[in-house]
């Protein structure tokens, strides 16, 4: 029999069991390097023979003529032979049996019942360490090793706590076995690392970029004779089996909508981060290739690739903060290109989310420092981290805002600021922070706008930018309008703070037009919405505190009414002191 199976699936043990069950008495093992043509000369004795993972290739194939000669010799010597081959090497023109291993739970259950009985299995089957182990993907050998310890627990000679670390040690041992030694091939090791970066992403992407990593790793390993990439190498399923991963059909979100793809994902969700950590920390010789690879990916034209490169760099920074900063974050932050600095900001953001130490301190120092590129990077990261670090983010962003407030208040300076990429990023970061953290940030922003002229401009810009946001649904009410309606219903002080900011914006020459545009949009949302109309009636009344404000708002409502045919604008005139009287006088 020829038995084919995946790596570490127990195909050799299955072959041994087949021969054992035949009751042959003696079982002999043949060298895997035995050529197909010479196998028959090693079968002279009556016995059970095992030829595990016979070495075959295009120049030394296993053919039907070899098998006929082997069969003739086996019949003559009253013997049996099982040949095992890797799944990827199974001969296409020769009959073979595919080996499917039993599940890890079946293996463990069989071991425990055979030594501790059904009662022993019932005692341990639902223990948390057992369920955790079974939730992950394990080979028959790993399941057997775990079962030995579980038997001791079932028999009362070992403690349950000892099982907890066993699953972690098993996973770590598997990762190190992938990366250590000659097998698997360097190209497959590169694929494993690539898949850890592109877990739950298209398989073709992980394979393509894995080959790019293989080229870089091979230059380190064989600098004098770089090896080419086999164009048609291992099959997709063979590579997924090696990685203990699964393939499945799903959709990938793109700029052009969802696209159907064949995706790949590790069966154990903890493998990707741990595999990256091991490659970075246990095998320093791989670092130059990994650094060059991720830097290359950060400039890729595909958003998914760039995002995953930042996520991988964040994991490596968590494992080794000084090296991560030196190899990825700082070079990206110091780059002249927008995409490079964006990669640095994304890496710092993700590094903090995976609990890398010292990220808040780094962001603060960069945000208030003199280096323009690093300041931009920190501002961008704060915008993304606002919900997580509201207090620290606001303090640092206000410090950065003061730097702009000290500029000479001239037309030229304002025009420069409007084109200043960093200022726009600062305004957007504060806007994101305001919408994410809401109450506490609103209170501080409202206070600073009233008391600190140096930061009034950026803060008003951020507030008005927040007023334009609609969330995921562009047809929904603006987020700040919805916020104001909720605060008004709850008699919250936030309604007064929102009103105060809007009133200051309406009276600020740099922001009047933008504030009027916001109010005009809000009036449009009041049509057909009694609650919004009621809220705007209160808001307009609070905004119109002097004759100039009354005239400005009256003009706005009449313009909206005439331009858009919005009847509610006419009705809202009642909220503006003198608005209805002025309307009657005109008539």
Image (cartoon, grey):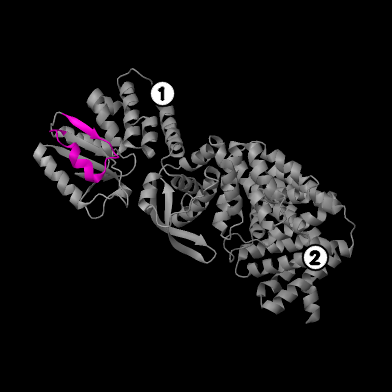
Mark 2 or mark 1: which is in front?
Answer: 1
Element at label 1 = helix
337 or 361: which is nearer to us? 337
**Going 34% across and 37% down the picture, which residue do you hit?**
139
Q: Position of residue 72 (x, y in %)?
A: 12, 44
Q: Quadrant of the N terminus?
A: top left
**Identity of the residue drawn at 60% across and 46% down:** 291
Image mark for residue 512 = 2
Total marks drawn? 2
Provide residue 292's location: percent of width, then percent of height: 60, 49
Percent position of residue 165, x then y:
44, 28
Q: Earlier in the sequence, mark 2 or mark 1?
A: 1
Is 126 part of what is drawn in magenta?
no
Q: Is residue 447 left or right of residue 234?
A: right
- In the picture as drawn, the residue positioned furthest to the top comes out as 157
In the image, residue 405 above or below residue 148: below
For residue 572, say whether it is visible.
yes
- Distance (Cα) linking label 2 and label 1: 68 Å
| Place of residue 169 in the rendered image (x, y in percent of width and height, measured from the top left) | 44, 30
Find residue 162 and name its label.
1
Task: From the viewer's perspective, tell me whether residue 180 is left or right of residue 153.
Answer: right
Q: Is residue 78 above or below residue 393?
A: above
Using the image, tell me which numbered label, if any, was put on residue 529: none
Front-lying residue, 223 or 481: 223
On-image quarter of the C terminus: bottom right
Mark 2 burial class by Cα count in 10 Å: few <14, some 14-19, many 20+:
some
- Residue for point 66% across, 70% down: 524
Read off the magenta span: 26-47
Quarter holding residue 10: top left
């Amino acid at each position: 029999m020829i038995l084919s199976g995946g790596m570490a699936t127990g195909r050799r043990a299955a072959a041994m069991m087949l021969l054992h069950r035949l009751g042959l008495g003696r079982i002999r093992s043949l060298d895997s390097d035995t050529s197909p043509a010479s196998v028959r000369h090693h079968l002279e004795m009556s016995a059970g023979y095992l030829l595990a993972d016979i070495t075959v290739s295009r120049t030394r194939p296993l053919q039907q003529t070899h098998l006929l000669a082997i069969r003739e010799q086996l019949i003559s010597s009253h013997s049996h032979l099982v040949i095992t081959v890797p799944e990827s090497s199974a001969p296409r023109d020769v009959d073979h049996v595919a080996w499917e291993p039993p599940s890890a739970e079946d293996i463990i259950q069989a071991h425990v019942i055979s030594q501790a009985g059904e009662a022993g299995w019932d005692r341990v089957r639902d223990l948390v360490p057992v369920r955790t182990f079974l939730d992950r993907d394990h080979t028959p050998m790993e399941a057997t090793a775990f079962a030995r310890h579980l038997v001791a627990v079932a028999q009362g000679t070992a403690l349950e706590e000892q099982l907890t670390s066993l699953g972690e040690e098993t996973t770590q041992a598997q990762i190190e076995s992938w990366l250590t030694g000659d097998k698997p091939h360097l190209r497959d090791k590169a694929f494993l690392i690539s898949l850890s970066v592109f877990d739950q992403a298209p398989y073709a992407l992980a394979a393509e970029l894995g080959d790019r990593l293989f080229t870089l790793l091979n230059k380190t390993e064989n600098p004098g004779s770089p090896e080419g990439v086999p164009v048609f190498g291992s099959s997709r399923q063979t590579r997924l089996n090696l990685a203990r991963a699964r393939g499945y059909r799903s959709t990938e979100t793109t700029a052009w909508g969802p696209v159907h793809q064949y995706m790949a994902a590790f069966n154990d969700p903890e493998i990707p981060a741990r595999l990256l950590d091991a490659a970075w920390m246990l095998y320093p010789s791989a670092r130059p290739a990994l650094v060059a690879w991720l830097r290359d990916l950060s400039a890729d034209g595909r958003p998914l690739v760039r995002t995953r490169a930042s996520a991988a760099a964040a994991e490596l920074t968590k494992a080794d903060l000084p090296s991560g900063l030196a190899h990825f974050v700082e070079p990206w932050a110091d780059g002249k290109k927008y995409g490079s600095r964006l990669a640095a900001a994304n890496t710092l953001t993700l590094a903090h989310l995976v609990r890398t130490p010292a990220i808040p301190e780094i962001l603060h120092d960069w945000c208030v420092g003199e280096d323009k590129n690093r300041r931009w990077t920190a501002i961008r990261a704060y915008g993304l981290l606002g919900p997580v670090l509201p207090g620290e983010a606001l303090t640092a962003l206000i410090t950065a805002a003061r730097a702009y407030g000290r500029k000479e208040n001239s037309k030229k300076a304002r025009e420069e600021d409007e084109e200043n990429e960093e200022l726009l990023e600062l305004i957007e970061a504060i806007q994101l922070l305001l919408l994410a953290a809401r109450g506490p940030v609103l209170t501080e922003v409202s206070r600073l706008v009233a008391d600190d002229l140096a930061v009034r401009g950026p803060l008003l810009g951020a507030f008005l930018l927040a007023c334009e946001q609609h969330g995921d649904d562009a047809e929904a009410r603006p987020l700040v309008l919805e916020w104001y309606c909720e605060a008004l219903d709850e008699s919250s002080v936030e309604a007064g703070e929102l009103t105060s900011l809007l009133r200051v914006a309406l009276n600020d020459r740099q922001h009047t037009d933008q504030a009027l545009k916001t109010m005009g949009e809000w009036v449009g949302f009041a049509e057909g919405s009694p609650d919004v109309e009621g809220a705007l009636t209160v808001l307009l009344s609070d905004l119109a505190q002097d004759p100039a404000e009354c005239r400005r708002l009256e003009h706005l409502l009449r313009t909206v009414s005439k331009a858009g045919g919005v009847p509610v604008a006419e009705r809202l005139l009642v909220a503006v002191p003198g608005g209805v009287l002025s309307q009657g006088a005109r008539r």
